[in-house]
Image (cartoon, rainbow, N blue to C red):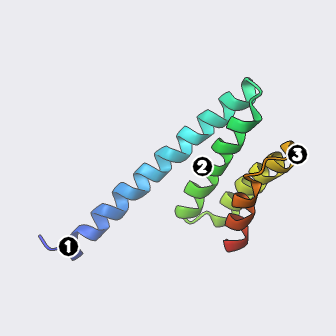
């Protein structure tokens, strides 16, 4: 089996892992909101946003990242620049 013939299998596995990752981030987001932990909410939103962008849902992923940035800015988190940079690249 050549590397070229393995590419579709790799893409299916990657897609499956990313899709599972999005579900995990959605569960983490729900929990973070339930326990009212904005810092964890930001991490879940960022993870979901990055995963969605990798899956080709860039607009939805960007919306998640914008929500994360809004929370970071409200909390005046110094790390908000990282999200700003990420959004400017998208």
Quarter of the picture containing the C terminus is bottom right
**In this rendering, would 64 be left or right of 48?**
right
Q: Identify the residue shown where x is 69% and y is 31%.
A: 32
Residue occupied by mark 2? 47
Residue occupied by mark 3? 74
- In the displayed structure, would residue 23 be above or below residue 53? above
**In this rendering, would 84 be left or right of 75?**
left
Mark 1 or mark 2: name the one nearer the start of the chain.
1
Residue occupied by mark 1? 3
Secondary structure of the residue carrying tag 2 is helix
Where in the figure is residue 12, as x and y percent of width and height? Answer: 36, 59
Seen from the viewer's position, the closer of residues 60 and 71 is: 71
Q: Identify the residue shown where x is 59% and y is 62%.
A: 53
- In the displayed structure, would residue 11 be above or below residue 5? above
Quarter of the picture containing the N terminus is bottom left
Seen from the viewer's position, the closer of residues 5 and 62 is: 62
For this orientation, the residue located farthest to the left is 1
For this orientation, the residue located farthest to the top is 35
Q: Which numbered circle lies on residue 78?
A: none
Q: Cα distance, mark 2 to mark 3?
A: 19 Å
Where in the figure is residue 26, as x and y percent of width and height? Answer: 62, 39
Seen from the viewer's position, the closer of residues 68 and 6 is: 68
Where in the figure is residue 27, as x and y percent of width and height? Answer: 60, 34
Mark 1 or mark 3: name the one nearer the start of the chain.
1
Where in the figure is residue 36, as x and y percent of width and height? Answer: 77, 27
């Amino acid at each position: 089996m050549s590397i070229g013939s393995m590419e579709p299998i790799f893409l299916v596995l990657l897609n499956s892992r990313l899709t599972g990752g999005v579900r995990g981030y959605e569960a983490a987001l729900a929990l973070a909101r339930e326990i009212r932990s904005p810092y964890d909410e930001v991490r879940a939103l960022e993870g979901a946003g990055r995963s969605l962008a990798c899956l080709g849902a860039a607009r939805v992923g960007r919306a998640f990242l914008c929500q994360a940035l809004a929370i970071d800015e409200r909390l005046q988190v110094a790390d908000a620049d990282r999200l700003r940079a990420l959004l400017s690249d998208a």
